[in-house]
Image (cartoon, rainbow, N blue to C red):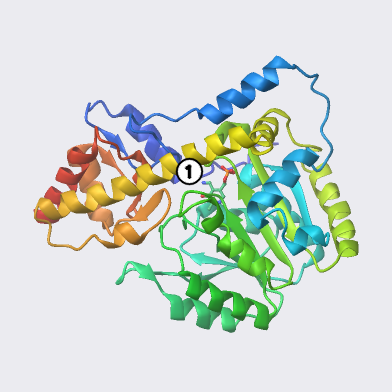
Amino acid sequence: LFAPVELAPRDPILGLTEQFNADTRTQKVNLGVGVYGDENGRLPLLQAVQQAEARLLATPRPRGYQPIDGAPAYNKAAQALLLGSDHAAITEGRAVTVQTLGGTGALKIGADFLRQWLPQADVVISNPSWENHRAIFERAGFNVGTYPYYDADSHGLDFEGMVKHLESLPAGTIVVLHACCHNPTGVDPTPEQWQRIAAVVQSRGLLPFIDMAYQGFGDGLQEDAATVRLFAGLGINVVISSSFSKSFSLYGERVGALTLLTTSADESARVLSQLKRTIRTNYSNPPTHGSAIVSTVLNTPELAQLWEQELAQMRNRIRDMRGQLVSKLAALGVQQDFSFILSQRGMFSYSGLSPEQVARLCNEFGIYAVGTGRICVSALNPNNLDYVAQSVAQVYKT
Ligand code: PMP
């Protein structure tokens, strides 16, 4: 019966990591990954997380089922982090938040819900976008198109192209937006550009689906939430997927949230009842441990403060690596201006490396990047930065 099952193509980024692991060169560097590495290249276990776990262990609790929509204290804290706890959408009962299996789970539940209730809508994602955006919305049954986003010539945003495209979309189109730290390019709209994007979304009657996988990795927790709060201030329907995978370094615990902004408390009650159905038929209810950690941190002022400090350290380290890479390349005499890397935000950078240059970095130097030229800046550290800069310089100069 399974004879017709075809072999699926390998995930390109995981494939890269397999190739990297098999490489025997000692100086090899993996810039293809999508996780934050500390100054020693290791995945951090945050102090705030360790202290929250110690508190949880001190009063062990049985592991019953959670409510379908997750832990109330977690949902409330996740919502407050997005909107600010006194936001009108919260006080007026217009915000519905459910716990999800990471940001991916939020996208999946959101996509399934929208497919059921807005079956005529199409989805647009940025060109380029995180690969899973297209896959998730297509799997849910949507037609997925793209809007212009990255401009290779300027290494920046094709803002006019983006706005023009959004203006041409039929009312009800679902527009997937990256709240900050765009994956894969690192290019975000400015606050003024966001204002215009929001105005077009509102006037065209589009549905913004804001994906926030990197809150705190751009300019700060509050600063990065500005996009979400801008859209929330419009009083229109908004969908937000958020994730603590990166900001808490809790990748494997699968902690995320899906938040829907509605136009009334009554609409919220109906939306929540249907979201629960969507969750129930996917995985019934979410797991306990990861959300208990996040909830403990966010609801304990001294742990929340410690977490913000650790998050700032991650953010500042990435920014420092961006700066050092740019200045080292200049010092090595590379003519190409790489200053755009400094204005990019988050873990990733579209470096401008061509597929041929990416292949040379891999073959000659054991430096692995994605074929599009995407590099994970947080994989750079004091131990590999000189080697990477020298290798990139070689590839540019010869
Ligand atoms: N959205 C974007 C833009 C992402 O980059 C990622 C993670 N790579 C996710 C969503 C999913 O996050 P999670 O790992 O929490 O499922």
Viewer-closest of 28 and 238: 238
Residue located 81% across and 52% down the image: 275
Q: Secondary structure at mark 1?
A: loop
Q: Is residue 338 left or right of residue 134?
A: left
> Total marks drawn?
1
Q: Is residue 159 visible to us here?
A: yes
Q: Position of residue 91 (x, y in %)?
A: 80, 59
* Residue at x 64%, y 37% (from the top left corner): 301
Residue 371, given in percent of the width and then of the height, sits at: 34, 52
Of residue 234 and residue 372, the one placed in the foreground of this image is 234
| Residue designated by label 1 | 11
Residue 159 lies left or right of residue 26; in this view the side is: right
The residue at 33%/68% (across/down) is 152
Q: Position of residue 297 (x, y in %)?
A: 63, 34
Q: Quadrant of the N terminus?
A: top right
The answer to whether residue 358 is above or below residue 367 is below
Identified by mark 1, the residue type is Asp
Crowding at dot 1, Cα within 10 Å, few <14 / some 14-19 / many 20+, comes out as few
Q: Quadrant of residue 312?
A: top left
Q: Is residue 70 visible?
A: no
Q: Quadrant of residue 199?
A: bottom right
Q: Is residue 236 above or below residue 308?
A: below
Left-right relation of 161 to 395: right
Picture coordinates of residue 182, whole percent (x, y): 47, 58
Please tell me which residue is depicted at 35% across the width and 39% down the height of the picture.
379
**In the rendered image, which quarter is residue 69 located in?**
top right
> In this view, which residue lies farthest toward the front?
302
Q: Nearer the viewer, residue 139 or 248?
A: 248
